[in-house]
Amino acid sequence: MSNKEVKFGVLCDTGFLIRLNHPQDPLHGHARSYLKYLLERGHHLYVSTIALAEYAVRDRIENLPMRSFRVLPFNIDHAQKAGEFAHIVFSKRDQMPVELTQRVIIPNDTKMFAQADTTIEVAYYLTADQKCEAVYRLIHESMSLRFKMLSLLIPCYQAFGELGLD
C-alpha cells in the first residue's frame, strides 16, 4: 500500500476485544493480525464505551492494549441514531431467525452501529459475531449505512484484498 492511502477508522466490538486478549481462542491470531495491520498502516482503531462495559463482564479493561484504541463515548447523536436502527430491527422481528429474535444484545449492537455510522472517521465495524452481522444486514436493507462490516472470521489481508506475504 502506498503512503497516499486514505486513512480510516475501525470500530472494534466486544468479540474482537475478547479474542485479542485470549491466546487460546481460535480467532486470536486474526485479531492480532488486524490490530497489527491497521496500526502499521496508520489507521485508527476505535472502541466504544459500550464494548468496554461488555468486556468488563469477563475481564478487566486495564488488560486491553488501550493505548492502541481511541475511546468512543456514547453521546446524544448516537442515541438518536441507535433508536432509529433499533426501530428497524424490532419492526423486522418476523423476518429474523429465532436465535436472533431471542438475542438480548440487539440494543447494544444498534448502539455501536449508531456510533460507527455517525463518526465520520469510522469506515468499518470489526466483529466476530455472525448474529451481529445479521442485525447489520437487516438495517442495511432499510437504509444506507456509512460503514461496512469486517468479519474477524476472515483474515485481514483477505478482507483488504492483499496477499499477506509479510
Image (cartoon, grey):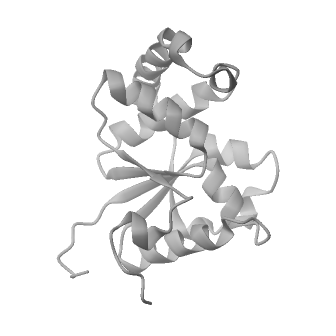
Q: Residue furthest bottom?
A: 166
Question: Quadrant of the image for the C terminus?
Answer: bottom left
124, 134: nearer the viewer: 134
Residue 74, visible in the rendered structure = no
Question: Quadrant of the image for the N terminus?
Answer: bottom left
What's the residue at 46%, 25% (across, down)? 82
Q: In x, y percent, where is residue 140?
A: 36, 30
Q: Is 39 placed above or below 119 here?
A: below
130, 71: nearer the viewer: 130
Q: Residue furthest left?
A: 4
Residue 24, visible in the rendered structure = yes
Q: In x, y percent, where is residue 18?
A: 71, 57
Q: Is 30 placed above or below 101 here?
A: below
Side of 4 where 116 appears, left or right: right
The number of callouts visible is: 0
Q: Is 104 placed above or below 155 here?
A: above
155, 124: nearer the viewer: 155
Q: In x, y percent, where is residue 49?
A: 59, 44
What's the residue at 37%, 58% (across, down)? 9
Side of 59 where 160 appears, left or right: left
Q: Is 39 placed above or below 98 here?
A: below
Q: In x, y percent, where is residue 21?
A: 72, 66
What's the residue at 55%, 33% (across, down)? 109
